[in-house]
Image: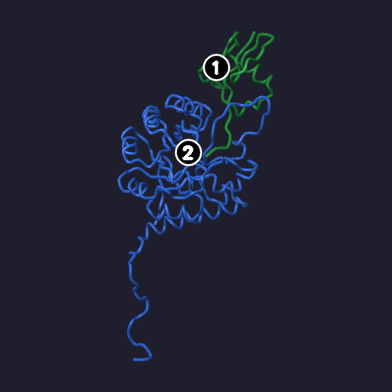
Amino acid sequence: MVDQLVIGDRSLQSRLFIGTGKYSADALIPEIIKKSGSEVITVALRRIDFNSPTGNVMDHIPSGMQLLPNTSGARNAQEAIRIARLAKAAGCGNWIKIEVISDNKYLLPDGYETIKATEVLAGEGFVVLPYISPDLMVAKQLAEVGAAAVMPLGAPIGSNRGLKTKELLKILIEEIALPVIVDAGIGKPSDACEAMEMGAAACLLNTAIASANQPELMAEAFGMAVAAGRKAYLAGLGRSEKYASSSSPLTGFLHN
Amino acid sequence: MEVVLNGTVANVDKEMNLWEFLLSKELNLETIIVEHNEVIVKKQEWKTIILQDKDRLEVLKFVGGG
């Protein structure tokens, strides 16, 4: 059976999306991509610092990867729209991760501004993947204004705390017809696997791989975990029961 | 004359177009994105824009992010 995730006009084999931030060297990125099996990768847009020019992350991303530029740094819809248009003008394609944040402590997204930006950008033909708190009504409105997926957080960005919002994520998966991609907070492959078992369409993570002692090995572990969780979801999990249920026959014992 | 480059005042000592200015900053022109007075400028148009006093330029690039 072919199990593909379709977003925009792209069919994806891998349901693991990865970031490019926080690596000790951008030169690690090609190996991370290879080991993870990921086909979608996020990047950010920033002013060039003329006092300390550095390399460009794009030099390390193989062609064929689906770029997912984010609007990090945007504090309102208008700024997110501006960043999205700049990314598109730079030849990044038409996918955009909307990230509108004005809370610097927990980096929680602004749902209202995110909806406004999504509506404008979807109208301009962008494939819009908004980063949100797992709020059902926000997700519903995003679906109405043309989002291609919703990306609720498992825990605050970069916290590696796992699926702290599990109950709310389950509601989104159940109620929203769009792909639900768990973004942010995933710390361990088992977190990613659990999200996939719950029926998430994909997982997006960055810090969990970048902050591992061996990022390449962790990238491989996440790729396997996401694939395993997806297969488990498709297979259908067995029921959980309070009491034991013997797996071996309860007849024909030697002492009978 | 002076232009505002990424929020900082920069001196331009002779008439030049946007492409010449960017080149003078020793940038890899293949990988940058430029806004001129809040308007995105395509690469093929860089040579057609003559910098004027008080122009505002934003020069951006992609960096790692999640």
Residue count near mark 2 (Cα–Cα under 10 Å), binned few <14, some 14–19, many ≥20: few
Work out which quarter of the rendered image holds the N terminus of chain A and state it. Answer: bottom left
Q: Is residue A247 left or right of residue A20?
A: left
Q: Which chain does tag 1 point to?
A: B
Front residue of this view, candidates A58 and B43: A58
Q: Which residue is mark 1?
A: B36
Quadrant containing the C terminus of chain A is: bottom left
Same chain check for tags 1 and 2:
no
Which chain is blue in the rendering?
A
Disc 1 crowd rating (10 Å Cα; few below 14, some 14-19, many 20+) is some
- Residue flagged by tag 1: what amino acid is it? His
Which percent across, then down, holds residue A48?
Answer: 61, 26
Q: Nearer the viewer, residue A38 or A197?
A: A197
> Who's the residue at 54% across and 55% down the image?
A221
- The hue used for chain B is green
Give the labeled residue for mark 2: A106
Q: Secondary structure at mark 1?
A: strand
A210 vs A171, left or right, is: right
Residue B26: where, in percent of width, then height?
69, 24
A173 left or right of A202 in image: left
Q: State the SS at label 2.
A: loop
Q: Position of residue A8 (x, y in %)?
A: 40, 39
Question: Where's residue A240, x and y in %?
Answer: 34, 64
